[in-house]
Amino acid sequence: MQRAALALASTLLLLGAFAAGAGAGTKKSSRAAVPGPLGGINLPGLGSGSTPSDADEEIAVARSLHAKAIRVELAWAVLQPDGPGALDARSLVYLDRLLADASSSGIAVIALVDGTPCWASSAPAALRGSCQSDGRSAASSWPPSNPADFAAFVGALAARYSDKLTALEVWNEPDQANEEYFAGPSKPQRYAALLKAGYTAIKQAAPGIKVLAGSLVGSNGIFLRELYAAGIKGYYDGLAVHFYTLTLAALREFRAVQLANGDSTPLWLDEFGWSSCYPEQKIQEEQACVTPAVQAQNITNIYRSLSRTSYVASDTIYKLHDGRNNQFGMLTDSGARKPSFTALASVLASPQRAPSKITLKLRRAGAHAVASGSAPVGDYMRMEVFKAGSLRFRATFTLDRFNNYSLSLPSVLGRRGLRVRVYQEWTGRAGAVQKRI
């Protein structure tokens, strides 16, 4: 999962200044009345001990959530631990069942392939010496010495599951600073080589399977531009992204970089979410903790906000189960349903409703007027303050972890005769709320 991309800002960022005239218009998000993204969830995926009964249970839960898609990790190190050639028989029994169950249930499968086996890793010798076949050791985060080994592996997967895989995602978070998933030097160039080799092999084996590049966490486009320079265009059907903080803003920013570089392929939001670790913790996996109720509310609002976004092909929440050290799941680590489970099932069944409305309350406090309220999660907020018919102040700000805000307006504006308008950038002024004081 993404550990750091954008930092959640619970403080207000005041960007406006006093102005005599009307402010510039706000660009609206690209939205159209089109079929929405494939909404779904990240499932546990392949582990060294995965069984067919695990697969049955996972797909049964996905059905109960009304998931249109699932994303699962297929660790190369687990599927091919001993060398090139044959795939691990026990792992294939699980995978055969999982994909058969998903196919019979009409659920699309996005398979993330990562985790270099010990025999193929380009890691330094010291790391390879302690490498383990479960794909969890440091050597597995290094890309293979020979991209052709990876190409042969994903080509074999594509041939075996040509009618059951919707998409194959090439690696996980190569731009992640912690290097837990893609370590070593020259990352853009080495990832581009891996992608090109994998794409060619997959398309030769099963042209209908979509190849996803990226799984990028950085929305500013720096790494993406380096990938373009390394020649990735033409070697993917979509770009996978993992945006946990300001999800909608990150999608919009990333899309702008794509279009500026002549790339209109769809985005696959393969990971996003919130940990229900508040109040026991404040930060987890470098993300702000929320309450179980806020987690459920956020899930509902993000899926609704994305339901008519033409350039997002899939949105799969992270994840089904809480882990030992995080609470991003819809189920606790003991299997109990959290409020987020009910919320996800409801919104996946019917995502087309509007997200929560913005609220606004104005009051006087000392020499200031104070504007406060709440809004849907996911994007920057805008405030505009008018006096005597003229725009006099504007601000850009973010919500706190509970999706609330409170701004003390500059005292020079006075406490009376003000009209205040608040809106989210994703919806623009069409979704604004305004009040007078």
Image: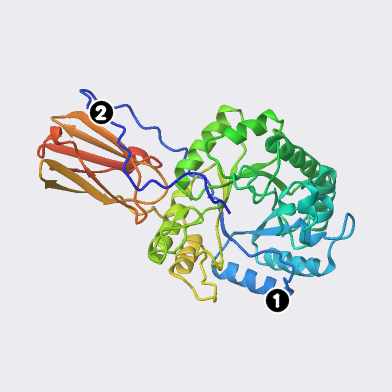
Query: Which residue shows up at 25% across the image and 28% down it?
Result: 17
Q: Nearer the viewer, residue 206 or 380?
A: 380
Element assignment for label 1: helix
Quarter of the picture containing the C terminus is: top left
On the rendered structure, is 136 left or right of 65?
Answer: right
Q: Residues within 10 Å of mark 1 (few under 14, many from 20)?
A: few
Quarter of the picture containing the N terminus is: bottom right
Nearer-N-terminus badge (1/2):
2
On the rendered structure, is 235 left or right of 37?
Answer: right
Task: Tell me where residue 36 appears, x and y as whole percent.
Answer: 53, 50
Tag shown at residue 17: 2
Q: Quadrant of residue 165?
A: bottom right
Residue depth check, mark 1 versus mark 2: number of the one nearer the observer: 2
Task: Tell me where residue 119 appears, x and y as whole percent.
Answer: 84, 54
Query: Which residue shows up at 74% across the image and 53% down it?
Result: 140
Task: Tell me where residue 420 appears, x and y as whole percent.
Answer: 21, 40
Residue 195 appears in view: yes
Q: Describe the colour scheme in one phrase.
A: rainbow
Q: Quadrant of residue 422?
A: top left
On the rendered structure, is 357 left or right of 139?
Answer: left
Element assignment for label 2: loop
Query: Which residue shows up at 45% across the image and 53% down it?
Result: 302
Q: Nearer the viewer, residue 426 or 241?
A: 241
Query: Which residue shows up at 48% across the image and 38% down it?
Result: 252
Q: Amino acid at mark 1?
A: Ser
Residue 114 appears in view: no
Residue denoted by label 1: 53
Q: Amino acid at mark 2?
A: Ala
- Please tell me whether residue 336 is drawn above or below residue 45 in the rendered image: below
Label 1, label 2: how far apart the Cα atoms are: 61 Å
Task: Tell me where residue 292 appears, x and y as whole percent.
Answer: 41, 66
